[in-house]
Amino acid sequence: MTTLEEYGIAFMETIISHVPTLLLAIVVLIIGLRLINLGTRLAAKAMERNNVSEDIRPFLTSMLSISLKILLLFSVANIVGIQTTSFVAVLAAAGFAVGMALQGSLSNFAAGVMIIIFRPYRTGDLIQVEGEMGHVLEVQIFNTIMSTLDNRTVIVPNSMAISGIITNLTVRENLRIDMEVTMPYEEDFEKVETIILEAIKDIPGVLEDPAPFVGIHKFDSHNIVLAVRPYAASEDYWKVYYEAHRRIKKAMSENNIQVAYSEGIELGKIGK
């Protein structure tokens, strides 16, 4: 018998001797993954039954799934015969390398934890962050998913959201709608004020308390700039905003009052 044949026989004997162990490890891995998936689904349902906030359910279920899979990986490695201490050392080295490569993702993870704890916004809130305005669909481990008012899906990294300025339009029950309307110098302010207030007071969603307000904002080179300030519930903001503009334009036209464009006027800024 040649040396090559001896090596081949020894190799086959080694594989055959380890087949039961490998099969056991594979079975444990498959069953373990299925049990983990089942357990996370049951945990999600249990959190829903116990009225756990929708903001933290995805975060907690993801963390539970990852933790259980790491434990399963250790168990499978132990069955195969890999020394746990060596395995931990390898994982630690790999984790350090991955952590250095994924510093941005880790900062997003840390920011996600801060959002969950301090709750500057929650699922369903209307927020403005990084120049985008929309409703929060979900706060994930690394990102915040938003649906904008024009039905776009925007994914904002949590680190960018938490480090920038967040405008939460849902926290306050009522919002002030800031509009600017120009009035010719020759017109009477009290007359125009009455026309505007009459035009917007019956708009569905406009609040009586605080009452709508019209005042002189500034004197332009060609016109007087009026500040129009109705209030509305946060969910009615945009409906009132557009309807107010429509009715003011109609009322001005019916009373033969010219609404001229003045350079530099910004319409529809959200009041602070």
Image (spheres, rainbow, N blue to C red):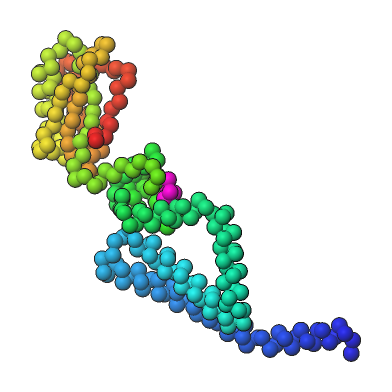
Q: Position of residue 245 (x, y in %)?
A: 23, 29
Q: Position of residue 125 (x, y in %)?
A: 29, 49
Q: Position of residue 271 (x, y in %)?
A: 24, 34
Q: Main secondary structure of the magenta part?
A: helix
Side (left or right) of 134 relative to 174: right
**Is residue 157 magenta-colored?**
yes
Q: Is residue 133 above or below residue 192?
A: below
| Residue 59, quarter of picture | bottom left
- Report the front residue among 71 and 127: 71
Q: Is residue 111 above or below residue 166?
A: below
Q: Residue at x 50, y 71 (%)?
A: 70
For the C terminus, the quadrant is top left
Q: Residue at x 49, y 78 (%)?
A: 32
Task: State the extent of the magenta-drawn residues as a range.
Answer: 156-160
- Report the front residue among 246 and 122: 122
| Residue 100, quarter of picture | bottom right
For the N terminus, the quadrant is bottom right
Q: Is residue 229 above or below residue 25?
A: above
| Residue 249, quarter of picture | top left
The answer to whether residue 239 of the structure is visible from this angle is no
Residue at the limit of the structure toward the top, as seen here: 186
- Report the front residue among 86 and 104: 86
Q: Residue at x 29, y 44 (%)?
A: 168
The answer to whether residue 102 of the structure is visible from this angle is yes
**Is residue 170 magenta-colored?**
no
